[in-house]
Structure formats: C-alpha cells, structure tokens
Amino acid sequence: GPRLILQTGGADGAIAHTRDHRLTAPAFRVEVADTIGAGDTFNAGILDALHRAEALARLDRLDEPTLTAALTHAARAAAVTVSRPGADPPWAHELT
C-alpha cells in the first residue's frame, strides 16, 4: 500500500498519513491572488523537503520531525504561490 498519503485543505492546512503517523500543518495566512498551482507547489515542496532530508528512500520509516518539517515547508511554498497571480511558485531563497 501507499507509504505516504497527503491531504491539502487550503486554509485548513494539510495532513500527512503514514502507517505510524497522522500529522498536520496549519496553512499560512496570506491574501489570496490566485489558487492556480497551489497543489503542484505543495507537492513540489514536500518532495523538496524530503529530498533535502534524504528521506525519499525511507518513506515507510519517516519520523515525526522530518514529516512535520516537510509539511510546513510545502504549506509555506503553496502560500507563496497563492499570494501571486498566475501559477508563480516561489524560488528557494523565498522559503528560507
């Protein structure tokens, strides 16, 4: 079965499910200009964070701090995207 299931809920934040965890990340409050690209940016943010944590190869053994940090990073990236018109995801330097 799946090792990681992600749910996004816009202003309600995001949820990650693994065999061992159900973790949430709140949405970042921004003035929404356009929602196009939010989901794609969220997914890219998750992959970016898990890659940087060298965790992509161990999705079945994700620990809570790594997964929480990845969810938060993805939510932050999506917030930047929706705050701009068009599908305009953030650059890496905008997320640090």
Image: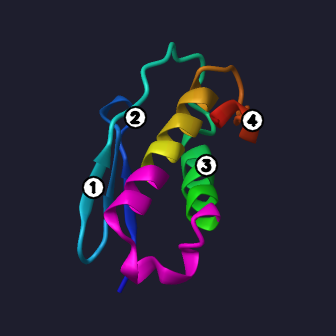
Q: What's the residue at 37%, 66% (across, down)? A: 5
Please give left or right for residue 3 compared with residue 74 in the image: left
**Residue position marked by numbered label 4 in the rendering:** 93
Q: Nearer the viewer, residue 85 or 27?
A: 27
> For the magenta stretch, what is the residue range?
52-70
What's under tag 3, amino acid-wise?
A: Asp
**Residue 88, can we see it?**
yes
SS class, disc 2? helix
Query: In the rendering, at what x and y percent does residue 79 appear?
Result: 53, 30
**Residue type, label 2:** Gly
Q: Which residue is mark 3?
A: 40
The residue under label 1 is which amino acid type? Leu
- The reply to whether callout 4 and callout 1 are in contact (CB within 8 Å) is no
Image coordinates for residue 63, horizontal then vertical, percent: 35, 69
- Which of discs 2 and 1 lies nearer the camera? The answer is 1
Residue 58 shown in magenta:
yes
> Of helix, strand and loop, which one carries label 4?
helix
**Badge 3: residue crowd in 10 Å (few <14, some 14–19, many ≥20):** some
**Is disc 4 surrounded by few (<14), some (14 to 19) or many (20+) residues within 10 Å?**
few
Question: What residue is pinned by disc 1?
Answer: 23
Q: Is label 3 in a helix, a strand or a loop?
A: helix
Q: Could you tell whether 65 is left or right of 34 in the image? A: left
* Residue occupied by mark 2: 10
Q: Earlier in the sequence, mark 4 or mark 3?
A: 3
Label 4 and label 1: CA atoms lie apart by 26 Å
